[in-house]
Structure formats: structure tokens, C-alpha cells
Amino acid sequence: MLGVIKIMNIIEVDNLTKKFKEFTAVDAISFQVKQGEVFAFLGPNGAGKTTTIKILTTLLKPTAGKISLNGCDPVKNANQARHSFGIVFQDPSLDDELTAFENMEFHGVIYGLAKKVRRERIEQLLKIVELWDRKKELVKNFSGGMKRRLEIARGLLHHPKILFLDEPTLGLDPQTRNHIWSYIKDLNKEEGITVFFTTHYMEEADRAADAIAIIDHGRIVIQGSSNELKEKTGAATLEDAFINLTGKPIRQEEVSGLDRLRQNRRLFRH
């Protein structure tokens, strides 16, 4: 008789809290992400989503609570945790004055990949995202969609177990967005990589996510599959469920774009 295969949680968050002086940005949230899962973390601007992601990716330290990424505590072992994940930031992080290949090569050197392994992996990933024929071109000549594809390939170069995607298709046309998600889903299946993403396009979360958590005012308000969220709220669409749970008022940004860029860059300095 065959045994039951138990799927492990690759991300575990337990009572995570982050305070900025008197303001509580994240308020004792708990959730888990299964290995190999595509997980959507949704919320309005200012809900605590950005702060949570920064803690998970070692850009911020929590005030309280516990986190585990691939069995590692990112607070105590930041460098080890960074080897477990790749990240595609919302703000551009490529060097426009380098070629596609040079951007990949630089990233591989930072992560200490052996030259032979690095070169083989670069070729493999650039072919997957259909940029191998453009590897010698300067990134500044790439379209927004091409840059996004390159960032995804770069984030996967060091064989991470988890890929964080912060608004991966922001500002892209529908055709390019569909292509990006096709690449992400293929990589999820082929490499068994866990995908943790944020988006304001509810149809993306509806189509792509195996599980969803919605955060608002620093607290997780609901978790489950898209169908479960719609059933629990009596909504016809995920967007309707989201609005029912979080309200209609327009929110302010949690942090400015400049602050995000500054904090993102710290990841590569340490």
C-alpha cells in the first residue's frame, strides 16, 4: 500500500507583527504556503502587504512573531534565507547599461555560482523566457515586457525554492501579461518552485493562484482558494469579494516609490 505524500509548508508565518513607533503596520498575522504552491497575497494600498513582503525577504526585521522560509529563520540567518528565494521587485532593478547576459552573469557571480553551472543556467533560463537571441543587447533597448521576463529569469538563476513577485505585470499590456503568466506557470510546474505574488489585477489571482490571503489594516481578513473566497462572501467574482472585504475607499500608498527602491537595493549590499 502506497503511503500518503505529505506536502510541507515552505513558508510559515506565525503571529507576525511590525510596528513603526506607534503605528502597527502588520498586526499578528499567521499564514502558511505549501511547497510548490502559487500563492497570492492581496490587499489595498497601505494594508500591510508591502511591509510583510519586506520582512519575508529580509529587507525589514519584525517587531514580534516567527517566520520560516524553507526551514530557515530569515531574521537570524538572512544570508541563508536569501539563497532560498528569488525576487522580482515592483520597481525596475536591472542595469540598463549592461546586456541581458551581463545582468544574468553579474547576479550569478554575486550568488557564487560556478562558471560552468552559471553559464548553463543562464542559457537555459534565457531560452525559457525567449530572450536567448537577444542576450547581447543592452537592456535599455528592451520593452517593459522583455525587462520583466529578464528579471524573472534572473530571479531563478540560483535555483531558489521560492520566487517572490511584487506586482510582476504592473503597467504591461494584456498580451504581455498573459505571456508573463504563461512563463511563471511553466516554471512553477517544471522546477517545482513556490510562487508568492502580489497583484492588483484580481483576474490574475483568480486564474493563477492555488491559494489566496487578503490582508487589510494589518490583519489577514480571509484565506482560501478563489472559489472559497467567493463562496464565503457571496460574490460572483474575486474582485467583488475583494471589495466586499476591504471596502471601496481609495487607499494611500504604504511607502513611496523612492523608499521602496532604496530598501530593495539593500538586499544586494549585504
Image: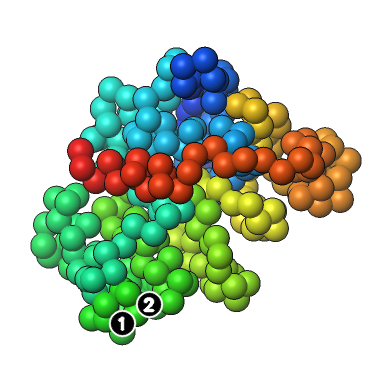
- Disc assigned to residue 134: 1
Picture coordinates of residue 142 (x, y %)?
38, 77
Q: Depth check: give the residue in front, 114 or 95.
A: 95
Report crowding for label 2: few under 14, some 14 to 19, many 20 or more residues within 10 A (C-alpha).
Answer: some
Q: What amino acid is labelled 2 in the image?
A: Phe
Nearest to the eye among marks 2 and 1: give it: 2
Report if the CB atoms under discs 2 and 1 are less than 8 Å apart. yes
Q: Which residue is mark 2?
A: 142
Picture coordinates of residue 224 (x, y %)?
69, 37
Q: Residue at x 39, y 59 (%)?
A: 92
**Is residue 82 visible in this depiction of the protein?**
yes
- Disc assigned to residue 97: none
187 relative position to 27: left or right: left
Q: Residue at x 56, y 28 (%)?
A: 31
Q: Depth check: give the residue in front, 39 or 75.
A: 75
Q: What amino acid is labelled 1 in the image?
A: Arg
Whichever of labels 2 and 1 marks the residue nearer the N terminus, that label is: 1
Q: Depth check: give the residue in front, 18 or 42.
A: 18
Image: 164 above or below 24: below
Image: 169 above or below 16: below
Picture coordinates of residue 182 (x, y %)?
54, 68
Image: 105 above or below 211: below
